[in-house]
Image (spheres, helix red, strand yellow):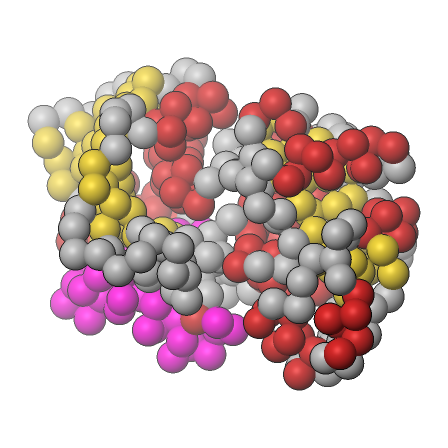
Amino acid sequence: MTKIKVGVSGYGVIGQRLADGVARQKDMELVGIADIAPTLSVRALKERGMPYDLYLVDGADKDKFEELDIPVSGTFEDLVNKVDIMLDSSPGGVGIANKKIYEANNTKAIFQGGESNEVADVFFHGYANFEEGVDKDYLKLTSCNTTGVIRAVDCLDREFGIDKVALTIIRRVADPGDYHRGLTNALQMEKAPSHQAVDLMTIMPHIEATGILVHTPVTHGHIITIVASGKEKITKEQALEAFKAHPRIRVVRIDDGFKGNASLFRYARDLGNPRGDMYEIAVWEDSIVESGDDIMFAINIPQEAVTIPETMDAIRAATGMQKTRADGTDATNENLGIGKWK
């Protein structure tokens, strides 16, 4: 079997997880990763025995890597020339500059949510619009919150039909280990509508969406409440059955100990998941309520890992490995072990 060759640009919070995700795909080969500095993530990679080859982007100081005895396999362009597709998890704004290199080398690429939409041919989600990404050169993923929201909304939409949704996003302020937001004891409002609602309508234009976002001084996960209006009334029992059947949705209950975002992070660690990652979003069964003809529920977004499955879907679509949503997402789920606990 010929494997699709993949490279990762940017070995940060998302890049580490993308590399691990590709390494778990039996039909893909991770050729290497690229970065600019011997960050803690790169140093940890070296201490782990360098399971992934490292390439340096323009502007990197090779001497610093040599001082730390971190082996380097070549330049960024060397990596781009060796792969079929690049996963670009560089800081926002860098990816669009990297695109010139991808174009010059006829290499496909997938960009993360921090890049502007014009960087890609298709704004992509594995479940909502897989087929639109098939054989395209450049795809862009949605943000972590948008990815999780679309999973839940698409789940109900395919089963029952959804006309509109309203979101309230209780957003973690920074990832664990980040200091750039400072130490704070405050909640911060953003202007409505949130970009997650706008992005959802871009990918699912048949649904009217609006949303409010509140930043909170926590690091482990976002919690989002969703009010969905179906084409016909959706009961709690119907919604619960649909959520339980979805491979990338984990239904949890407060009485079982899942009191909030920290409970889910701890549970992921207790499962032995690397870095405490969880690919699934969680829906609290206790939160599903009927409000007139609408259905309301709350989900948890594990922000560091939730986009990884959809990125694997994007590789499959862009390279034509699978042509349909069902085949593509099933292959990703199997390789990542998603849904095996159901």
Find the residue positioned furthest to the left: 292
Q: Position of residue 136 (x, y in %)?
A: 74, 28
Q: Is residue 17 visible?
A: yes
Magenta highlight range: 248-275
Q: Splitting the image into 4 quarters, where does residue 206 fall?
A: top left
Quadrant location, the N terminus: bottom right
Quadrant location, the C terminus: bottom left
* In this view, 215 is above or below 175: above
Residue shown at the point (70%, 51%) measured from the top left: 9
Residue closest to the eye, 257 or 187: 187
Residue closest to the eye, 308 or 179: 179
Q: Splitting the image into 4 quarters, where does residue 34 fall?
A: bottom right
> In the visual, does 168 lie left or right of 11?
left
* In this view, 120 is above or below 215: above
Residue shown at the point (60%, 62%) measured from the top left: 16
> In the visual, does 321 lie left or right of 247?
right
Q: Position of residue 100 (x, y in %)?
A: 78, 32
- Total label count? 0
> In the visual, does 98 lie left or right of 189?
right
Q: Is residue 273 magenta?
A: yes
Q: Position of residue 246 (x, y in %)?
A: 43, 48
